[in-house]
Image: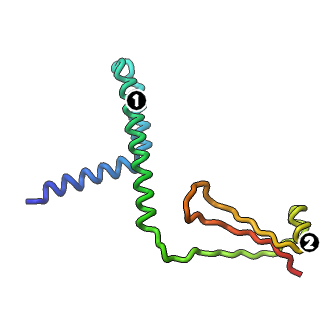
Amino acid sequence: MMLPPLLWLLGAGAVFLGTLAFWSSIQNWLADVIQRTRARLGASADTLMSALVIVDRVMVNGQRVIAATGRAIFQNEGEEPVVIEEVRPLMAEELPADVRARVEAGEPISYELSVSSMQVHHVPTYKLAVRRTD
């Protein structure tokens, strides 16, 4: 019967996903336990702390790989970007002096504001365009 091995596999997967999801809390708890039992552990406490650092690096890189894989799988290639435009009138005095001078000279002004510091290809960008309306 295949049910018991399948249950073990599902249980191990659930434990692994739970560990990935709550790794920072688990790591802090383990480091605190090792720190409190330093007197009993002796020289092996430093070895355990070093092992915890190595396991932390593996877990964090695993989280990054899973996130990157999820973005690659669930990213829609044919989807058009969402464009939201907000238009509101401003008094000329509300603009900074350099922007006001450029608008009065008739120059078009546009700025691109990125909402993320990560170097991802599909980063949402907001465009601000200042135009003179008479």
Q: Is residue 12 left or right of residue 90?
A: left
Seen as rendered, the residue at the extreme bottom is: 134
User: In whole angstroms, how far apart are the C-alphas of marks 2 and 1?
Assistant: 64 Å
- Which amino acid is tagged 1? Ser
Q: Residue 22's mark?
A: none
Horizontal and vertical percent for residue 129? Answer: 77, 71
In the figure, 99 relative to 50: above or below?
below
Q: Residues within 10 Å of mark 2 (few under 14, many from 20)?
A: few
Mark 2 or 1: in front is: 2
Horizontal and vertical percent for residue 67? Answer: 44, 56
The front one of 57 and 94 is 57
Of helix, strand and loop, which one carries label 2?
loop
- Residue 89, quarter of picture: bottom right
Horizontal and vertical percent for residue 65? Answer: 41, 53
- Precedes in sequence: disc 2 or disc 1: 1
Q: Residue at x 31, y 49 (%)?
A: 16
Quick check: marks 2 and 1 in contact, CB under 8 Å?
no
Of helix, strand and loop, which one carries label 1?
helix
User: Which residue matches tag 1?
Assistant: 50
- Which amino acid is tagged 2? Ala
Query: Which quarter of the rendering shows the C terminus?
Result: bottom right
Q: Residues within 10 Å of mark 1 (few under 14, many from 20)?
A: few
